Image (cartoon, rainbow, N blue to C red):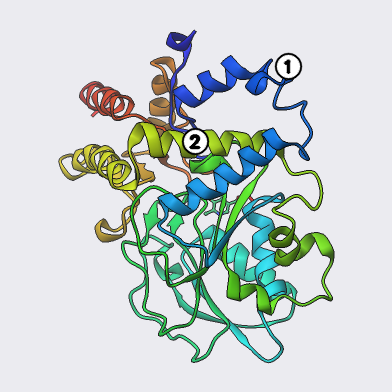
Amino acid sequence: MAKDRINNFNAGPAALPLPVLEEIQESFLNFKDTGMSITEISHRSAPFDAVIDDAAARAKRLLDLDDDYNVLFVQGGASLQFAMIPMNLLRAGETADYVNTGTWSTKAIKEAEIQGVKYNVAASSEDRNFCYIPKEFSFTPNAAYVHITSNNTIKGTQWAGYPDTKGVPLIADMSSDILCRKMDLKPFGLIYAGAQKNIGPAGVCMVIIRKEMLDRVPKTIPTMLRYTTYSEKNSMYNTPPCFAVYTVQLVLKWLEETVGGLLEMEKINREKAATLYDLFDNTEFYSGTADKESRSLMNVTFRLPNEDLEKKFVAHALENGFGGLKGHRSVGGCRASIYNATTKKAVAELVDFMKTFEKRNG
Ligand SMILES: *Cc1c(COP(=O)(O)O)cnc(C)c1O
């Protein structure tokens, strides 16, 4: 069974750890001796409570966050968070700061714009097609929050460190790099991640909110759009996406118990990324599109000498068992997404393939 699987470099939905998929398969018809599938049990049952509580506890342990933070599971993807953040967290008269580092940041800003709130773009890397992370910021003193996209899935850039906002809470869209490395998240008031990149299947977005941020949530917004609703009801005001939450729980368990935590994960991720970037730095044939110091550990974007060769590369790669290497439709080129679940072996095999492809076509 497993040997039919290809090396998956999809950007999202993306590869999941094989042991997680196997555990799902194994327990699919009879979850924890209930005689039912996880997709058939009540969300108001002890076995499901155990799943959602364990997922939240593991996320906080892995990220070194204490009980000042709540872990919420929300539907609507990261894209709904673009709208919920200004709706819930901006008080009358306050300004929200945004750093624009690519397609997803731009969409987050658009949702603030739609709501007519005051916002300030504190920095942008649009001048060079978002190939770098800005270093200079014009933050608003006493802003309600500063929103960043920690990893730019489409442009292949990632913040190496987070900006000093002088006490203003940071908010990050971590959809494509949550739990990929050890970072201090204490300056964050909220982080969120659509699960389908690095922590699970599509259908759930993990939102981690500092409890004091909940004081900002107005009662005048619809129930399902309030962070307080999710916080007060353990994300079960209505039926949560049970299967997606269950898969996230298993991925977090894998990360803690099999990988051994974020320091280990980061080491593996750095090695994987380095093999690809070293290749770019030693050839003219493949060129990385992101500035060196802004390179992403998760989404490695690159070009070949021309578009015909890029098409040929993507097609030949697939014939050889490497999937998902086409760049996002908005930017073209190629992209290897190497999230936590992508093994060192898969990346090493890809690099070998790329070297052979260069010899034959360079
Ligand atoms: C994929 C992605 C999104 C969109 O996520 P949805 O869950 O589809 O709404 C937002 N932000 C980033 C950084 C992403 O990679």
In the structure shown, which secondary structural element does the residue marked by tag 1 occupy? loop
Counting residues from the N terminus, which is met first, the one under dot 1 or under dot 2? Answer: 1
Pinpoint residue 309: horizontal percent, then vertical percent: 37, 31
Tell me if the residue at label 2 has its CB under 8 Å from ligand 1.
Answer: no
Q: CA distance from mark 1 to mark 2?
A: 23 Å
Position of the C terminus, as image quadrant, is top left
Is 147 in front, or is 70? 70
Q: Residue at x 69, y 15 (%)?
A: 29
Pinpoint residue 22: horizontal percent, then vertical percent: 51, 18
Q: Residues within 10 Å of mark 2 (few under 14, many from 20)?
A: many
Is 248 in front, or is 351? 248
Query: Mark 2 belongs to which amino acid?
Result: Val
Above or below, 123 relative to 52: below
Left or right: 209, with 62 as reference point:
right
Is 205 in front, or is 106? 205
Q: Residue at x 81, y 75 (%)?
A: 219
Q: Are marks 1 and 2 in contact (CB under 8 Å)?
A: no
- Total label count? 2
Query: Mark 1 belongs to which amino acid?
Result: Gly
Q: Is residue 337 visible?
A: no
Which of the two discs, 1 and 2, sits closer to the camera?
1
Above or below, 87 relative to 275: below
Q: Residue at x 40, y 20 (%)?
A: 316
Name the residue beneath numbered marker 1: 35
Q: Is residue 6 visible?
A: yes
Name the residue beneath numbered marker 2: 251
Q: Quadrant of residue 113?
A: bottom right
Q: Residue at x 49, y 56 (%)?
A: 174
Above or below, 187 relative to 53: below
Pinpoint residue 186: horizontal percent, then vertical percent: 42, 69
